[in-house]
Amino acid sequence: MAMPGVYAYTATPLPVADDGAELAEILSRDIPWEVYMTARLIADKDLQLIRRYDKRSEELQASLLDESGPAYIEAFLTVLRNVTKEETVQYILALLLQMLRANPARAALFHQVGEAHAAAGGASELNPYVVLLRLLQRADWFTQEKSCKLLTRVIAARPHRGAPFVHVAGSSAAAAASGPAGSSGSAGDPAEPHITSFVEWLCGQLRRPSNPTKSVPTAISALAVLLRDKATRGLFTSAGGVGLLAPLLRSCTGPTSSQLAYEICLCVWQLSYHKPALQALAASGVSKGLVEVVKSAQKEKVVRVALLSLRNLLGEPDLGAASDMVEAGLPKVLATRGLQSWGDEDIPELLEALGEALKEQAVVLSSWEKYKKEVLSGSLDWSPMHSSEGFWRSHVDKFEDKDFQLLRVLLKLLESSRETRTLAVACNDVGRFVEYHPHGRYIVADLRGKELMMHLMKHPDADVQKRSLLAVQKIMLPRDKLDFMLAASSGA
């Protein structure tokens, strides 16, 4: 699947000016540079360069960088490598970000420093990747965030971008087949191990954020830039990052999340040109989140990139994404959105093309097939099947297939899912299994289901508490008392 030339519209550079006030506050500090030279943490030449640059006008700083840019970058990296004092590290990071805000092309200076040291047999510790990756392990969020932004800029400006990654399955072959953009050298990209570490750190931020409000937007912004590279898509897929995007997209509701939704959709769209990632996207149920974005997004750029992502998912009929889109109400959304006027002339064409593609791939699934697909996706929603008495009476025996595979998946979700809605629905479904299967309570107990749900009775979400309590009651009560309780409940 060839990637169309629409980056000018979608792949906006990582913003570095959005934190200008914060950077200005950090840069108002006075740093005692002489102390670091006395302590032999920096050399005299570094001190002279920093003094000449620090607190100067933007015009003078630009002139100094034009004259001896690599020397200044080397001095700043030396401080970041050798100095541990938080205030000083933050100051240098702010200085570097301010430099890139004034002229993003200066990111190339970092590579001139790294290559010069490598050619001279210098210490790898002054490699900009090594220095910035170490800073990601610091405790304070400012240092983590600014190092992340700098790393993203430095990686995006690397001289070997487009070269294949030799340690990613299939990346070399894919790059070789993709033409000039992916054939810049058989030796691969020397930045690969550093980019691998960075992508793993970004995935870690999506799983367990260091900062409750800023980690996810920061990581997604970085990925929206990094995933322009074919090889990086392979790294992200191998790191298990693809499955993290669907839950994040579903949580983006309201106008305040517009930029985050846009960048997640941009990540999805770029990944949809990498076959293994496309398969993982379809399995994760990301289509439902994309449909919701098309339905509710106000900004045209957000609607556009969501439609492009859906189009690519439909481009591989074997993935079965069409049924997810139909279940999520895409035909109605397309009809409603088609009545609007759009400034972007491509959007009406995309809406029409998606509608035609859906008709061609119309798939009618049985209720059990729909349920099975939903459970295996790892993300549950309150569709009618979960509360339908007829559904459970008709299909409860199918839970025995493949050694109770679906029941085991539900129990695994109780243990590992972080989505409160998925937890609540899974508790409901395990309880329904106990209710309708003649040996359900014993089977669930043997699989540790009771312990898992008793643990969820302490969950902070009230609905999860209620559903887990009800399921535990169904396991513990004898059949006659359970029938009495359910009859009383339905009568109420």
Image: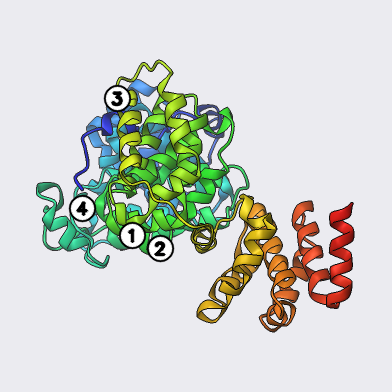
Q: Which mark is residue 235?
A: 1
Q: Which residue is mark 4?
A: 116
Q: Mark 2 or 3, which is nearer the eye?
A: 3
Amino acid residing under circle 4:
Ala
On screen, residue 325 above or below 114:
above
Disc 2/disc 4 C-alpha distance (Å): 32 Å
Q: Is residue 483 left or right of residue 302?
A: right
Q: Quadrant of residue 424?
A: bottom right
Disc 1/disc 2 C-alpha distance (Å): 6 Å
Q: Residue at x 64, y 69 (%)?
A: 415
Q: Residue at x 42, y 40 (%)?
A: 265
Viewer-proximal residue among 388 and 37: 388
Q: Residue at x 26, y 67 (%)?
A: 169
Q: Position of residue 358 (x, y in %)?
A: 35, 41
Query: First in sequence: mark 2 or mark 4?
Result: 4
SS assignment at label 2: loop
Pointer 3 local density, CA inside 10 Å: few below 14, some 14–19, many at least 20 = few
Disc 1/disc 4 C-alpha distance (Å): 28 Å
Amino acid residing under circle 3:
Asp
Q: Mark 1 or 3, which is nearer the eye?
A: 3
Pointer 1 local density, CA inside 10 Å: few below 14, some 14–19, many at least 20 = many
Q: Position of residue 194 (x, y in %)?
A: 34, 59
Q: Which residue is mark 2?
A: 239
Disc 2/disc 3 C-alpha distance (Å): 34 Å
Q: Which mark is residue 346?
A: 3
Amino acid residing under circle 2:
Ala
